[in-house]
Image (cartoon, helix red, strand yellow):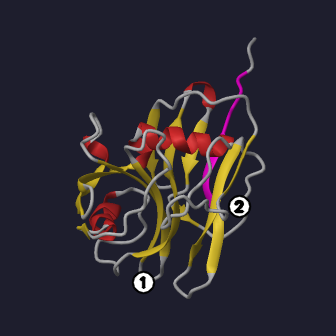
Amino acid sequence: MAVIHHTALKPTKLELLTAWLPTRPWYLGSADEPALVKAGGFRLDDPQGEVGIEFMVVTSGTHPATYLVPLTYRGAPLDGAEHALVGTMEHGVLGRRWAYDGCHDPVLVTQLLALIEGRVQAQDQNTSDTPDREITRSYRGDGLTPFTTVTDDQEGTELSAPHGTTLRLHRVLTNGPDLAPEATGHVAGSWRLPDGTRARGLFVVLTSTKHEVA
């Protein structure tokens, strides 16, 4: 179980993301947009208790856009993931923490697949040992193979596995149906809009393309 420490972070997560988000191909704004605002999210537990896993939802812009930002927090650098480093922070309890784009962290990807398959439960973003009942998921399949490539584009982030299986993270969130009938699996959730109302939509969609054998 992940323990949520209510303590100071320097710089804060939002300060790190303010510098990092404009470097992403799926970011819709400009570098001088208004300050980011936390709009929601959830956590997953690392079975080893070493890596913090958070799916943060933030809003930015004069005409606000809402972004899904999966992050991992580690007590030491992740080998081979320099390209995915969001930044470092000083944690009031845990000391130096390295924050990564979680799509490139195998611990987050493994736990996300476990969530889709129903083997783990989403956790509240701010309270220890409290399930997040607003996060829904589905899966119809017979097991998932490891993903071998991660690609960012203007539509979001896609993780690909052999034989046509893809995991698409909707980095720019839209209010709409939280089911994808054509998908093999999905994760959906809700977030706060700037006017205080709540929106809901898809976070993650899993698809599989079966190839016929002649």
Q: Amino acid at mark 1?
A: Thr
Say above or below: 9 vs 2.
below
Residue 89 image label = none
One can see residue 206 in this view: no
The image quarter in which residue 89 lies: bottom left
Residue drawn at 53 percent across, 42 percent down: 111
One can see residue 152 in this view: yes
The image quarter in which residue 118 lies: top right
For mark 1, give the secondary structure.
loop
Residue drawn at 24 percent across, 64 percent down: 92
In magenta stretch: residue 209: yes
In the drawing, does residue 58 fall left or right of residue 124?
A: left
Residue 38 spot, x, y in % from top left? 44, 74
In the drawing, does residue 184 fall left or right of residue 153?
A: right
Say above or below: 75 vs 188.
above
Reading the image, the residue beneath label 2 is 178
Crowd rating for badge 1 (residues with CA inside 10 Å; few <14, some 14–19, many 20+): few
Residue 152 spot, x, y in % from top left? 43, 48
Stretch of the chain drawn in magenta: 202-211
Which residue is situated farthest in the top direction here? 214
Q: Amino acid at mark 2?
A: Asp
- Cα distance, mark 1 to mark 2? 26 Å
In magenta stretch: residue 77: no
Which residue is situated farthest in the bottom direction here? 195
Reading the image, the residue beneath label 1 is 62
Mark 1 against mark 2, which lies toward the viewer?
A: 2
Residue 43 spot, x, y in % from top left? 50, 56
As rendered, which of 185 and 72 lies closer to the eye? 72
Residue drawn at 78 percent across, 50 percent down: 181
